[in-house]
Every structure is written in structure tokens, then in C-alpha cells.
Amino acid sequence: MKLDLTQTKIVGLTMELDLKTREYKKLCKKLEEYKKRNIDPNNKKMEELFKEFQKNHEKIKDIKQKLCSLNCNKEIENNDENY
């Protein structure tokens, strides 16, 4: 099976999204560890963790937007082929 350029981009973005999802889960575990140790929310470590969460969230949002765009373009291409 041969993939076209759009399909290849979709596969790559899906893999990147999976990686960022795993990273998110690791950040959640780290947050739970901090909570168990009763680290103050204003602590420098917590600030850095929240920055990592924000960066991860922005990247996931960007990937999902790109995937949506590619999927919409793919649907348009498929509809054009049917006419």
C-alpha cells in the first residue's frame, strides 16, 4: 500500500500526537508526586511543571488543528474525485 503526501503527513502527526499524549501522562504522574509530597503550589518546581503542561497543551492543540485541516482537505479531495 502506497501512501500519498497527505496520508503520510496524517500518520506523522498522529505519531507526534501519541508522543505528546504520553508526555502529558508523565506530567500528570509528576504532578501527583508533588501533591503527595505537599509541595507548595507557588514553589519554583510547580511553576516549571505548569509551564511544561502549558507548552504540551499548546503543542497538542496545534497538532490536532493540523490533523483536522489535513482531514478536511482529504475529504474535499475525495469528493472531487467522485464528481
Image: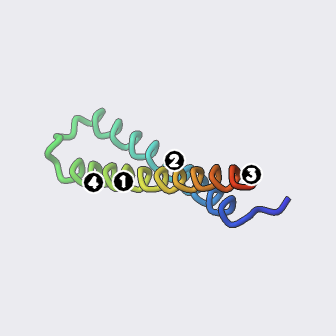
Residue extending furthest toward the right:
1
Residue behind mark 2: 22
Q: CA distance from mark 1 to mark 2?
A: 15 Å
Identify the image quadrant of residue 59. bottom left
Residue 83: mark in rendering? 3
Residue drawn at x 76%, y 50% as measured from the top left = 82
Residue behind mark 4: 51
Marked residue nearer the N-terminal end (1 or 3):
1
Residue extending furthest toward the front:
83
Q: Secondary structure at mark 2?
A: helix
Judge the density around disc 2: few (<14), some (14-19), many (≥20) Cα neighbours within 10 Å. few
Judge the density around disc 3: few (<14), some (14-19), many (≥20) Cα neighbours within 10 Å. few
Q: CA distance from mark 1 to mark 3?
A: 38 Å
- Say whether residue 54 is left or right of residue 15: left
Marked residue nearer the N-terminal end (1 or 2):
2
Residue drawn at x 21%, y 51% as measured from the top left = 47
Q: Which residue is nearer to you in this view: 17 or 41?
A: 17
Q: CA distance from mark 4 to mark 3?
A: 49 Å
Marked residue nearer the N-terminal end (1 or 4):
4
Residue behind mark 1: 58
Marked residue nearer the N-terminal end (4 or 2):
2
Residue drawn at x 41%, y 50% as measured from the top left = 61
Residue extending furthest toward the left:
42
Q: CA distance from mark 1 to mark 4?
A: 11 Å
Of the residues shown, which amino acid type is indicated by label 4?
A: Lys
Q: CA distance from mark 2 to mark 3?
A: 41 Å
Q: Nearer the viewer, mark 1 or mark 3?
A: 3
Q: Which residue is nearer to you in this view: 60 or 77?
A: 77
Of the residues shown, which amino acid type is indicated by label 1?
A: Glu
Task: Give how far across and how far down residue 25 sits, in percent.
Answer: 46, 42
- Are the residues at dot 4 and dot 3 in contact (C-beta closer than 8 Å)? no
Q: Which residue is nearer to you in this view: 6 or 33?
A: 6
